[in-house]
Amino acid sequence: MPAEHRKPLWLYPNLLSLDAPLVAVAWLHVFATTWRQYLPWEFYASLGLAVWAIYASDRLLDVSLQGQPGGNLKARHEFHRKHRKPFRIAILAAVAAAVGLAVTTMPSTIYIHLLLGGVLVAGFFGLSMLSSQSPDEVPHLKNVLAGLTFAFGTSMSAHIYRGYGIDDLLTSREFLSFAVLCVLNISAIDLWEHASRAADIEIKASDELSLTLPLAVLGAAALGFAALDGNQAVRPFFYAILTGAALLHVLNRNRTRFSIDALRVLADVALLVPVLVFHAASGE
């Protein structure tokens, strides 16, 4: 295989859309541990399958919207374009398995959460089709909805056993902090790509500031929430949020040292390392 077509091994989780499911499953465990809930393996499996199907479908949709191969297609989109048929078959199998696990193993109380999750996913795909595909625009609204959807889907399984309503989840400090972290993580890639294409120094500085300020606010909020936790029950969770914000900030300041593909992988690492911090802080 020619060198220009050979992909490094570290890029394959991104090419195969395995990065997002891994992050989702890891953070579901963080939510379940924080809220003192035991979840059987079926919950983790159904979440991983559903997230993978959504992300792979989104990339196939992006390919269809961008039209011809090549051009502005990113590596992960080009990979999905070349292997469209296997991905489509795998997506159908993943959806069937996820639905089967949800119907046969999960309590009926999760259905209201699944309904809202379905609305969020539908809204995300709707924005994907309606939003501009211009590389000169950053899809902020789509990124916000994607982050909220990802955070809701990740946390809802751990929340249903707490005995509270869905409004309690949406207003909880844990959900809101993780949702903001997800939005900033998703937005970071688009902002880094936008800054790399811009020749104007002011645009580059604006893109960097668009991440620096909200990351600083999120970090300060995580520290405040940790300090307010008198019995230290959720303090490790907010230490993890703080770690994720700090790692994204470091990447943001050093983004010119890495390729866009490397930054995509490192952005996922910035959400996985906090899981290790969480376990260290909680003494597990």
Image: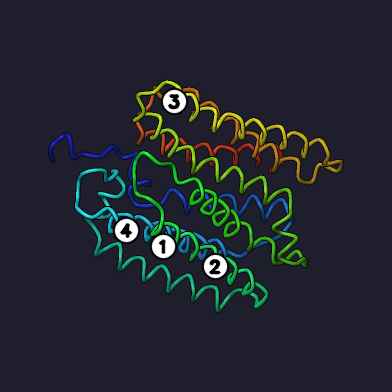
Reading the image, the residue beneath label 1 is 53
The residue indicated by pointer 2 is 119
Q: Do the residues labelled 1 and 3 touch (CB within 8 Å)?
A: no
Mark 3: secondary structure? helix
Asked if residue 19 is positioned above or below residue 153 in the image, the reply reads: above
Residue at figure coordinates x 55%, y 61% from the top left: 44
The disc labelled 2 sits on which kind of residue?
Val
Q: Which mark is residue 92?
A: none
Q: What residue type is labelled 4?
A: Leu
Q: Are the two marked residues, 3 and 2, in contact with CB atoms closer than 8 angstroms?
A: no
In space, the residues marked 1 and 4 are separated at their CA atoms by 11 Å
- Horizontal side, residue 149 vs residue 240: left or right: left
Dot 4 crowding, Cα within 10 Å, few <14, some 14–19, many 20+ = many
Nearest to the eye among marks 1 and 4: give it. Answer: 4
Q: In this view, does 214 lie above or below 160?
A: above
Residue picked out by circle 4: 60
Quadrant showing the N terminus: top left
Question: Residue 158: image x %, image y %?
Answer: 66, 60
Q: How crowded is mark 1: few (under 14 residues within 10 Å), some or many (20 or more)?
A: many
Tell me the element at label 2.
Answer: helix
User: Label 3 is placed on what type of residue?
Assistant: Lys
Pick the front one: 278 or 118: 118
Disc 2 crowd rating (10 Å Cα; few below 14, some 14-19, many 20+) is: few
Q: Residue at x 63, y 63 (%)?
A: 157
- Which one is closest to the eye, mark 3 or mark 2? 3
> Where residue 207 appears, x then y in whole percent?
48, 30
* Residue that numbered label 3 is attached to: 204
* SS class, disc 1: helix
